Amino acid sequence: MSLRTDMASDRRRQLAYRARLLTEADWFSTVAVCAIAVNAMLLGVETYAGFADRWELQLKLLEHLLLGVFTVELLMRAAAHADRPAEFFRNPWNIFDMVVVLGAFLPFLSENTTVLRLLRLARVVRTARFLPQLRIIVTAIGKSIPGAVSFLLVGALLLYLYAMLGWASFATADPEHYGSLGRAALTLFVLMTLDGLGDAVNAGLRISPWSVLYYASYVLLSSFLLVNLLIGVVINSLEQARVLDEERKVPATPDPEAAQELRDRIAAARACLEDLEGLLVHVPAQPEKAGTTP
């Protein structure tokens, strides 16, 4: 039973090693990127009704061919983890690939044209898997979501406070921009981009000289402080994504045949040592030489 288990384990290691050599080859990534690019072009071509109706059969054949390429690519990546299957599912990109590729085979999804097109569109995102820098950026976007949500909450609170203050101060004199909370919030949201700030300040000065303090403090907090905080969140997420990408890189696995040869040599050396130990038992002990005295 143990011998059979060891043989099966060796087969899995050999399969994983050979599949890993294939998936880590440059031409393999090139073929996958080209297939994704053709898939993106195919989606764009299908938006032209006349062309799609004329070449409907050829487009469907090409779509099935691309689906076969993506399926084989996914199976090869799964085979590269035959010796450690759990590692395959720990990578979010692998799970994403499974959902996008295998979803096209599910009956209730393949029959829905809209869902099927969305799945085909999601294949374009898989380009990030084969481009390291793009993969880091996409990962950083996911990592920055919690920080971005906090940023949005702080920004919404700041916008609400200044909108209420603007409504209380300028609603009567400038109802077009501050006549309600919604109008005030929309005006301040546009001012966050510094668009029309000069006109808003001039209009505020005609109402009250204290409006300069209102606009200056709002621009300082919204356009400078919050934007810099958002940049800090993005930079921190980029660094985390870069570190995470380095940790996910699988170290090169030695050739199973070379490893087996090394194990055989160690076993042979151990057998030789045991034979030598057996011979030492039959060797008579040598008498100690008497020391000479001066």
Image (cartoon, rainbow, N blue to C red):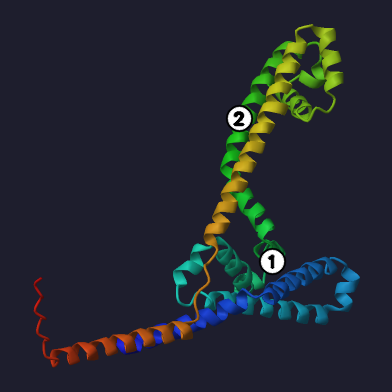
Residue position for label 1: 123
Q: Which amino acid, by three-letter code, is at mark 2? A: Val
Establish if 177 lies above or below 283. Answer: above
In what element is the residue under mark 1? helix
Q: Which amino acid, by three-letter code, is at mark 1? A: Arg
What residue is shown at x 52% (from left), y 58% (from top)? 247
Which badge, 1 or 2, is on the more N-terminal residue?
1
Across and down, in percent, residue 274 comes to 23, 88
Residue position for label 2: 154
Local crowd size for mark 1, using a 10 Å CA cut-off: few (<14), some (14–19), many (≥20): many
**Is 11 on the left-hand or right-hand side of 119?**
left
**Is 221 on the left-hand or right-hand side of 149?**
right
Please identify the quarter of the rendering in which residue 186 is found: top right
Quadrant for the N terminus, please.
bottom left
Across and down, in percent, residue 175 comes to 80, 17
Please identify the quarter of the rendering in which residue 92 is found: bottom right
Establish if 205 lies above or below 21. Answer: above
Give the Cα distance between marks 1 and 2.
35 Å
Across and down, in percent, residue 293 comes to 8, 72
Establish if 123 lies above or below 164. Answer: below
